[in-house]
Image (cartoon, rainbow, N blue to C red):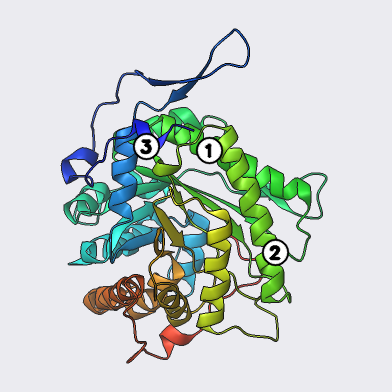
Amino acid sequence: MASASLLKTSPVLDKSEFVKGQSLRQPSVSVVRCHPAAPSALTIRASSYADELVKTAKTIASPGRGILAMDESNATCGKRLASIGLENTEANRQAFRTLLVSVPGLGQYISGAILFEETLYQSTVEGKKMVDVLVEQNIVPGIKVDKGLVPLAGSNNESWCQGLDGLASRSAAYYQQGARFAKWRTVVSIPNGPSALAVKEAAWGLARYAAISQDNGLVPIVEPEILLDGEHNIDRTFEVAKQVWAEVFFYLSQNNVMFEGILLKPSMVTPGAECKEKATPQQVADYTLNLLRQRIPPAVPGIMFLSGGQSEVEATLNLNAMNQSPNPWHVSFSYARALQNTCLKTWSGRPENVKAAQDALLVRAKANSLAQLGKYTGEGESDEAKKGMFVKGYTY
């Protein structure tokens, strides 16, 4: 891992630094020399993008802002559209994604948007590049780079995440298209173990992805999602999360990943969705912050929590509880359903509802912005925002 001493104190990114078409840098590298135990010297290569990675991470982890996750695969996006009676066509996906990225004032509360590959190269219904619309709002474009989950042979019906093959060339192309950060989601299932094999595979895959992303100018979001499925209590979740994050940071270090140039997307520490013992926002905050203090180095600039099927209000309340006192990291959000659900249902595919749907998204974005600052009260929330969204065996 490159030493923090190599990095100059850098301001946040200016819009001009992540516009589409910026040429790739030449592969010049900084070199850190380690004192050898043997006559031959060991050299560790630090990414030629080191300063830019730190700037990007700081921009995304800026006060009162978080990430809009809109990187659902076309199949998952189809399920969302089906819930409001729309067909899964490119035109319908384009219409909804246009609605999301073009909300006036969204950049006040949203610092980054994770896109699916189709969206990264897509234009709005008005013919403007989605990436350009985001940049104009001072929102950093990101890209989902994994290729999804497949069964892990030799495990207890667990999964592993594929996508390392060809990742370097794809990442370079995504950078050229305007992406400045990346996301790779793997999962850990508590009811199925988790087995040591599944945890190690998840951690190693995340570490290789993170190293490749940084080498190509993309800040990696490290996301080992501990699924909500199960009847286990909050203490069991806490123990598994400690095990998973210990393994993840071991392999991140082994792969010389620069901690100052990554972001984390962990699950909050909660009971299983089918556990009879429910946890209060304060309990969730206490367990989750205890986990972070034990496992996450302060060099990491941002912790961007996933919602994982919590209701919109529940996810916001839990985030708010974690920001009632200062933290070593920027503790914020990277929500998909917990930002989009009411917005999608308000829209229902009708052009005349676009303004109301955009207003609904802005309400949720502002609520989570307040939660990041520890100032959310929960007053005036709709019944729809309080509905849970857990789906057993959910695939993204």
- The answer to whether residue 350 is above or below residue 35 is below
Label 2 sits on residue: 239
Q: Distance between the residues labelled 2 and 3?
A: 37 Å
Q: How far apart are marks 1 and 2 (CA)?
A: 25 Å
Q: Which residue shows up at 38% across the image and 74% down it?
A: 344
Q: Indicate which label's residue lies in the foreground, 2 or 3.
A: 2
Query: As rendered, which of 268 and 165 lies closer to the eye?
Result: 268
Where disc 1 sits, the SS reads helix
Label 3 sits on residue: 174
Q: In which quarter of the image is the C terminus?
A: bottom right
Callout 3 crowding tier (Cα within 10 Å): few <14, some 14–19, many ≥20: many
Q: Indicate which label's residue lies in the foreground, 3 or 1.
A: 1
Left or right: 186 in relation to 102 = right
Q: In which quarter of the image is residue 304?
A: bottom left
Q: Indicate which label's residue lies in the foreground, 1 or 2.
A: 2
Give the percent coordinates (x, y) of residue 374.
35, 76
Dot placed on the residue nearer the N-terminal end, 2 or 3: 3
Give the percent coordinates (x, y) of residue 299.
43, 47
Label 1 sits on residue: 209
Q: Which residue shows up at 37% across the image and 37% down it?
A: 174
Give the percent coordinates (x, y) of residue 380.
32, 92
Dot placed on the residue nearer the N-terminal end, 1 or 2: 1
Callout 1 crowding tier (Cα within 10 Å): few <14, some 14–19, many ≥20: many
Q: Quadrant of residue 337?
A: bottom left
Where disc 3 sits, the SS reads helix
Q: Which residue shows up at 28% across the image and 58% down it?
A: 62
Callout 2 crowding tier (Cα within 10 Å): few <14, some 14–19, many ≥20: few
Amino acid at dot 1:
Tyr
Query: As rendered, which of 195 and 343 lies closer to the eye?
Result: 195
Amino acid at dot 3:
Tyr
